[in-house]
Image: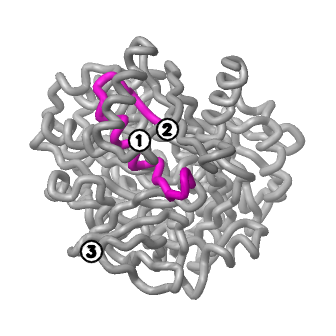
Amino acid sequence: MNFIDYLFEYSKHSDNFLLLSRNVSLTYRDIYGDILRISSWIQNSIGTNSRIGILADNSPFFVQVYGGIIHSGNTAVIIDTKSSSKEIKNIISRCSIPIVFADQKYESLAAGVRVISCIPGDTSQSNLCLPSQIPKDTCAVIIFTSGSTGVKKGVMLTHNNLIANTNSILQYLNLSSDDRMMVVLPFFYCYGASLLHTHIRSGGSLVFDQSPFLGGALKGINEFQCTGFAGVPSTFLILVQKTPFLNLKFPSLRYFTQAGGHLSSSVIQKIGRTFPDKKFYVMYGATEATARLSYLPPDLLFDKPDSIGKGIPGVTLEVRNEEGNVVRPGEVGEIVAAGDNIMIGYLDEPDETARVIRDGWYYTGDLATVDDEGFIYIIGRKGTFIKSAGFRVSPQEIEDVIMQVDTVDACVVFGIPHPILGEAIIACIQSESDGEGLISSVKKHCSSLLPSHKQPADIFILQYLPLNSSGKPDRDAIKRLYKLHDNQSE
């Protein structure tokens, strides 16, 4: 089945609201009609089996164009709006994109190809295209990984990948047409796209927050009686530290979801204790897995701190050692996954695809251990471990300890070359507190909880940690800032 026909299977003629904001309210019937018109126009203009770009913020325009491209039998190439003009030009070239649908403010970034900034098609035409019969293994979407390190990779997801992952997420979140999500995550990010997919399929609603500050989203939750709120670690850190979030009431809210990186259990449990009547889903995933791979049931939030849970319905997760055997409790290995949600590969990168997909299993690059009940705990990522004084040190372990200090808002730990230690441990902290006092507090706290070989050799304070477009700390940018600071200090 065409993925768009699957999403709108039960709601295409519904007059329930699909998209809501302070400026617009559009029904399923409205949106689906526009999708058909765009699909028809694309088929008549360029046919099928092409790659078509989208360069737009969250809006009805994004949803209409995204649906129209996929429905027409073409591939939607979702471009991060925070990309540089050079990166966008590279994506357009790599994907041989003939047309880019773009917000007017981004038109100049897509130079060299035809750019469309409004919905095309004759609104009076009666012979709108019928649902497209497309093989399930046809590529429907290409999403480029955030690229915090190295060159961005184009993750190719099929109609079947998207359908399978949407079905899985709906099962454990128990979404229905009564659910309404406050959206602060961009749709060009796989986590944001999954919110769009699951709520359309369930017949629910999506509320756009167009405020540049999360405080606006908090007001919108009550104003629009939202039942769900989704965020990455930086989202929840900002809410807890910079807004009145913990002192507010949200009577309509049913649940929170968190993915996109590790959020300290101390922060998660603070939210859980503040809102005991709301479910908090800790989740884990990857763009290569369409979106989601695992979740921790909310009733285990305090029993299994720092666990990412187990595989979602339809996904098999294992933690394997270097010999390919499943690890025993307490042993460390790499998380591998199998399921219909796993990508068909990276665009034009067969060697890289073969490296991460072997014998039907996706090798995530995340290192983890398991407990006696099979719950998974990530301890770090391959390549990020610090080799200091002959020891292999997990940055995440040190970050979790530093985050326990009250005045620390966020933390990133990394290693730099050192002539004696091999690598010295550096902690970069986001805080507005006094520098020397905070550094002293952090060092004292670390010395009380960590062995000497895991204690930071240097602590660097920033008012704000740079983030990538997915809201994750940009480790490369943070390292560059530290090197600049270190050079100036010499």
Q: Which residue is mark 1?
A: 399
| Residue 408 is one of the magenta-drawn residues | yes
Asked if residue 77 is positioned above or below residue 234 in the image, the reply reads below
Q: Which residue is mark 2?
A: 412
For discs 3 and 1, the disc positioned in front in the rendered view: 1
* Front-lying residue, 269 or 449: 449
Asked if residue 242 is positioned above or below residue 155 in the image, the reply reads above
Q: Which residue is mark 3?
A: 374
Q: Are marks 1 and 2 in contact (CB under 8 Å)?
A: yes
Q: CA distance from mark 1 to mark 2?
A: 6 Å
* Left or right: where 293 falls relative to 330: right
The quadrant in which residue 309 appears is bottom left
Secondary element at image label 3: loop
* Left or right: where 219 falls relative to 184: left
Q: How many marks?
A: 3
* Left or right: where 248 falls relative to 53: left
Q: CA distance from mark 3 to mark 2?
A: 28 Å
Task: Report the magenta residues as a range.
Answer: 386-411
Q: Amino acid at mark 2?
A: Val
Of the residues under marks 1 and 2, which one precedes in the sequence? 1
Residue situated furthest right in the rendering? 112
